[in-house]
Amino acid sequence: MRRRFSEGFVAPPVIEPPFTEGKDLTPAAVLVPVIMRESGATMLLTQRTAHLRDHAGQVSFPGGRCEESDASAEATALREAEEEVGLPASQIEILGRLPEYRTGTGFVITPVVGLVTPPLNLRLDDFEVAEVFEPPLEFLLDSANHQRHTIEVRGALHEYWAMPWHGYYIWGATAGMLVTLHRFLFHEDVTA
């Protein structure tokens, strides 16, 4: 993973339906946190609380809207990871960015990939985060687990990615960014 980022490979972005055409998009960033466990790498994901205005109850990466005080997408991702789950920047090695992901809810998200060194002493923001869980990175990066589903939005059918795992439904933007990470790691350079 370090090598792919250091050599400048570019992942082909996952293009989802253009729900956001004609809208001003809100900049956001998420941390794509790869936990370096002795038993194998995992991915730290959050289950959002059910009362939130945006993406209530969904599985997501730690992250959120960029604030004027954030110097970069990396700063946003690190700040949000500490606020939402208590993950300090000192335990995170930032590797790089994946292509921006545009959502149907009006966000343009910069995924920032980082390696996280255990042990984790997480403190969840109980207003935003109901729980955290760690699927194996091997499962998430296996294309056999990448499912396409269809949803009707404003009378039109649209496809989206999903990766069900042990009772959790990883879908939409989070699954799309995981598919992008898979493409980044396992496909040829597409910078040309």
Image (spheres, rainbow, N blue to C red):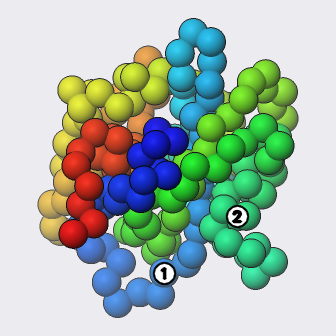
Q: Which mark is residue 76?
A: 2
Q: Position of residue 146 (x, y in %)?
A: 26, 35
Question: Does dot 1 land on a helix, a strand or a loop?
Answer: loop
Task: Identify the residue under disc 1.
Answer: 25
Q: Which of 21 and 113 is in front in this view?
A: 113
In terms of image quadrants, where is residue 124?
Answer: top right
Q: In this view, does 166 lie above or below 182?
A: above
Picture residue at 48% right of the left edge, 72% below the top: 108
Q: How crowded is mark 2: few (under 14 residues within 10 Å), some or many (20 or more)?
A: many
Query: At label 1, which amino acid type do we have?
Result: Leu
Depth order, front residue of 2/132? 2
* Disc sitting over residue 82 in the figure: none
Q: Residue at the spot x=77%, y=57% of the render?
A: 79
Residue 114 in the image: above or below residue 158: above
Total marks drawn?
2
* Front of the two marks 2 and 1: 2
Residue lying farthest to the top in this orientation: 39
Across and down, in percent, residue 83 comes to 81, 51
> Which of 192/149 is in front?
192
Q: State which quadrant residue 170 falls in.
A: top left
Q: Residue at x 16, y 67 (%)?
A: 156
Find the distance from the CA under tag 2 to the CA under tag 1.
Answer: 16 Å
Quadrant that contains the C terminus? bottom left
Horizontal side of residue 112 vs 86, given as left or right: left
Q: What element carries label 2?
A: helix
Left or right? Give the position of 122 relative to 103.
right
Query: Residue 29: image x %, image y %?
Result: 59, 63
Q: Is residue 47 above or below residue 7?
A: above
Find residue 48 and report its image quarter: top right
Identified at 59% across, 68% down, the residue is 28
